[in-house]
Amino acid sequence: MPAMTGAIVVRETGGPEVLEWTEIELGKLGPGDVLLRHKAVGLNFIDVYQRTGLYPVELPFTPGMEGAGVVEEVGAEVTDLQAGDRVAYTGNGPAGAYAEARVLPASRLVPLPDVVDDSTAAGVMLKGCTVEYLIHRTFSVKAGHWVLLHAAAGGVGLIACQWLRAIGAKVIGTVGSETKAELAKRHGCTHVILYREEDVAARVRELTDGRGVDVVYDSVGKDTFEASLDSLCPRGMLVSFGNASGPVEPFSPLLLAQKGGLFVTRPALRHYYTDREESRAGCKAVLDAVVDGTITVPVHQTYPLRDVQQAHRELEARNTTGSTVFVID
Ligand code: NDP
């Protein structure tokens, strides 16, 4: 009989109710693969996009892009990992992390330093790697740059606040509540805008003496696109990297000329974590930043994997701050 594992399966796209706890077959261990027993798995907004069908995935599938755990078995050609090693992985491969165990290529795994616990790892691998490429490689943020960061108290947001503060950038965060404003400030925002009460672009102009920011990091999408463009300085860059409020509507490039020769890019992690070398270097930069204290990982919500529906509901309802992690016994 094939080996089985407890896992979440999505058989048809839809609301949180399509997330079903069940038993699935573990894949066959190929020569370059590892059987990983998960200890903690991260929840990310991409899991919602895949569940709803916004990002199409072949059905049925097990969601989840990042995790941390212990190697249980290695394939015949795996030389750099062995049973008992603590490892983690980020979101540059197929989904499948919402499971007690999974088989995946050894090339996707990085060793975990002893001081980084499983929840911290699961709370930072995808979100931290996202921040790493966004602020160092999509736009290279330097000390003194003005940055506008939407959803500043979210999972990606609180990590970005801290890393941007360490660089010496001036960060304006947008948030949906006073509690989130406090959190964003504590993690490094220089200024916070409560977008439900204030006009974001007008407030950004005020804070920057009319100039606008050098770069906007926008994961909210549809609702914030226009304000993001209107907040930029001439030749500034809008990094549109998510769709929490829905995808951005089509627009004419002429708009970018009218608003100051602006740049817009729409990156995904897989464009910056393209091969083993790039991926290892990025993951190392993130884990180094955790170890040296540049970032602490705010894991503010934890759930057993069986409570996945509730976890998705809370994330979509904007009730979460920082990272959410599924802890697996
Ligand atoms: P967050 O913890 O940031 O949660 C989303 C937050 O977005 C909410 O808490 C809320 O904050 C804000 N928001 C604004 N409008 C809405 C809305 N209509 N519905 C829900 N939330 C809304 O999630 P993550 O940290 O997991 O991800 C942040 C974003 O980054 C996501 O859009 C994700 O897809 C994107 N991402 C992109 C990657 C890439 O490589 N392109 C990789 C990883 C993440 P508030 O209450 O303050 O408004």
Image (cartoon, rainbow, N blue to C red):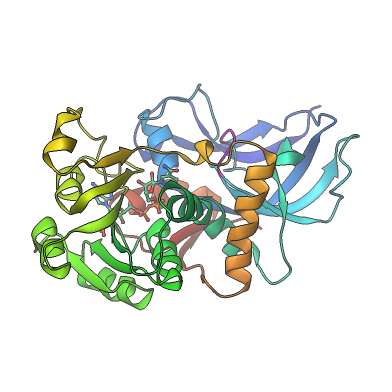
**Figure check: 310 above or below 172:** above
Question: Dividing the picture into quarters, in which one does residue 252 lie?
Answer: top left
Magenta: main secondary structure equals loop
Q: Nearer the viewer, residue 101 or 121?
A: 121
Residue 66 at x, y percent in the picture: 57, 47
> Which residue extends farthest top?
58
**Figure check: 106 above or below 141:** above
**Figure check: 17 above or below 40:** above
Residue 213 falls inside the magenta stretch: no
Residue 112 at x, y percent in the picture: 71, 60
Write down the region rendered in magenta.
91-95
Residue 93 falls inside the magenta stretch: yes
Q: Nearer the viewer, residue 52 or 271?
A: 271
Q: Nearer the viewer, residue 59 or 222?
A: 222
Left or right position of 252 against 117: left
Question: Dividing the picture into quarters, in which one does residue 99 lie?
Answer: top right
Which quadrant does the N terminus fall into?
top right
Residue that appears at 85% across and 30% down:
31
